Image (spheres, rainbow, N blue to C red):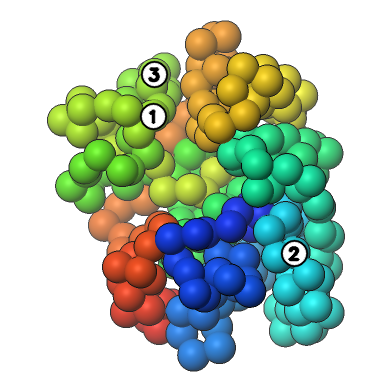
């Protein structure tokens, strides 16, 4: 198993930080960045290799690659997304389609979360699941969240931001365990998704899989403090909680 990080996005709502850096390299605890926290989590659960999808301001990641490898004891492979500033992240995850064949834990490059999330996903393996989403079933939801309706026996039924929060089982937090056996089907669903509309999310690719009859499962993460950093308010929260991890 390897780690996979989506770190290609521009994060325009975080300017001026993202004038020169991708969102994943915005500091959240001193010099510690969002990417640092994710790599630290991956190292703690015993991973030794991580692939990172890069695009916007990718030079900054390349410049830090050797230092990050040394700090976390990880071999990093950087994968270029040539459309990072034009298309949404369904295409970005598709760029990592070869990495997924190794079994991966995927983490969005803007999610500050504790290692307990990865541990929860690993503990949920072993009953034939091919894709398991980390799900927050505690948080009160609003319009911006990536909401999920899940059936205990059949897994994800619906995943979208465009849903009445009252309908949702919980929020997908941007961390997924993907078994290599799902790689080809997921890649095909992602390709169909961005070819339909390049502005779609990779979660729309998960919905495409569900629509095709593929079971996507969930693992509730419990009462965990985490944040997806999209704007300056999120960044303030991320800085408040990052020092705890």
Q: Identify the residue at image location x=81%, y=65%.
A: 76
Q: Nearer the viewer, mark 2 or mark 3?
A: 2
Label located before the other in sequence (2 or 1): 2
Q: Secondary structure at mark 1?
A: strand
User: Which one is nearer the viewer's eye here, 230 or 158?
Assistant: 230
Q: CA distance from mark 2 to mark 3?
A: 35 Å
Secondary structure at badge 3 equals strand
Residue at point 42%, 23% (across, down): 155
Of labels 2 and 1, the one closer to you:
2
- Residue that numbered label 3 is attached to: 157
| CB within 8 Å, label 3 to label 1 | no
Per the image, the residue denoted by label 2 is 58
Q: Quadrant of residue 193?
A: top right
Tell me the number on the disc at residue 160.
1
Which residue is outermost to the bottom?
Answer: 30
Residue 30 x, y percent position in the rendering? 49, 90
Where residue 43 appears, as percent x and y from the top left, is 66, 70
């Amino acid at each position: 198993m390897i780690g996979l990080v989506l770190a290609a996005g521009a994060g325009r709502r975080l300017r001026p930080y993202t004038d020169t850096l991708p969102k994943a390299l915005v500091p959240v605890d001193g010099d510690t960045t969002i990417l640092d926290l994710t790599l630290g989590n991956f190292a703690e659960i015993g991973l030794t290799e991580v692939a990172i999808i890069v695009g916007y301001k990718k030079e900054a990641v390349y410049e830090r690659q050797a230092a990050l490898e040394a700090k976390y004891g990880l071999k990093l492979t950087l994968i270029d997304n040539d459309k990072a500033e034009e298309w949404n992240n369904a295409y970005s995850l598709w760029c990592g389609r070869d990495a997924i064949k190794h079994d991966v834990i995927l983490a969005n490059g803007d999610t500050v979360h504790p290692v307990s999330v990865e541990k929860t996903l690993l503990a949920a393996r072993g009953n034939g699941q091919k894709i398991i989403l980390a799900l927050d079933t505690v948080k009160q939801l609003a319009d911006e969240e990536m909401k999920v309706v899940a059936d205990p026996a059949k897994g994800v039924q619906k995943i979208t931001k465009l849903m009445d929060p009252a309908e949702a089982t919980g929020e997908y937090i941007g961390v997924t365990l993907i078994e290599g056996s799902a790689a080809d089907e997921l890649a095909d669903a992602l390709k169909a998704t961005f070819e339909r509309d390049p502005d779609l999310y990779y979660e729309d690719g998960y919905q495409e899989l569900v629509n095709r009859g593929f079971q996507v499962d969930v693992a509730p993460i419990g009462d965990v403090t985490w944040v997806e950093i999209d704007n300056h308010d999120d960044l303030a929260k991320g800085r408040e909680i990052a020092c705890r991890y």
